[in-house]
Image: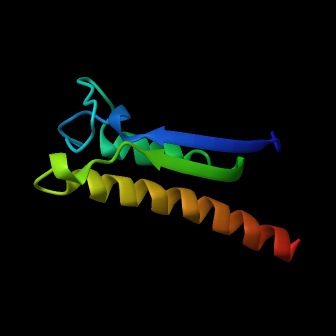
């Protein structure tokens, strides 16, 4: 409904193939595409805050974990920005 939502994303929810740069890699996790799809599905929720944790660039020579994390953060920020704009227009 319209109840406030806080979401916390631990980047190790992604499979190590998509996010090797974390302190606790979890085999069998989501793909980065699946995570972004889930986040985009939250567009109608009343997202008030979010965090994204466990990104450890020192463990990721290709920086793909940081790329996945930045895209997830972008999606979350976009949802919140759209909600602010919609509330101003109302």
Residue 69 visible somewhere in the drawing: yes
Q: Residue furthest left?
A: 61
Number of numbered discs visible in the structure rendering: 0
Quadrant in the rendering for residue 26: top left
Q: Quadrant of the N terminus?
A: top right
For this orientation, the residue located farthest to the bottom is 89
Q: In the image, residue 58 lies at what x, y percent? A: 18, 51
Residue 26 to residue 21: above or below: above
Q: How is the image coloured?
A: rainbow
- Quadrant in the picture for the C terminus: bottom right
Q: Quadrant of residue 80?
A: bottom right
Give the left or right position of residue 87, taking residue 71 as reference.
right
Q: Is residue 43 visible?
A: no
Residue 57 in picture, x, y percent from top left: 23, 53
> At 31% from the left edge and 28% from the top edge, which residue is drawn?
29
| Left or right: residue 7 compared with residue 44 | left
Residue at 32% of width from left, 45% of height from top? 32
Q: Nearer the viewer, residue 20 or 82?
A: 20
Q: Nearer the viewer, residue 14 or 33?
A: 14
Q: Is residue 28 above or below residue 59?
A: above
**Residue drawn at point x = 29 percent, y = 59 percent:** 67
Residue lying farthest to the right in this orientation: 90
Q: Is residue 22 above or below residue 36?
A: above
Residue at screen point 75% across, 68% down:
84
| Residue 32 in the figure: left or right of residue 74 | left
* Residue 47, percent from left and from top: 69, 51
Tell which of 15 and 33 is nearer to you.
15
């Amino acid at each position: 409904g319209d109840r406030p939502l806080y979401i916390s994303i631990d980047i190790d929810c992604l499979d190590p193939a998509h996010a090797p740069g974390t302190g606790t890699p979890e085999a069998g996790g989501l793909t980065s595409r699946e995570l972004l799809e889930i986040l985009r599905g939250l567009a109608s929720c009343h997202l008030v805050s979010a965090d994204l944790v466990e990104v450890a660039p020192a463990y990721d020579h290709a920086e793909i974990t940081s790329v996945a994390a930045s895209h997830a953060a972008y999606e979350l920020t976009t949802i919140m920005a759209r909600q602010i704009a919609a509330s101003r227009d109302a």
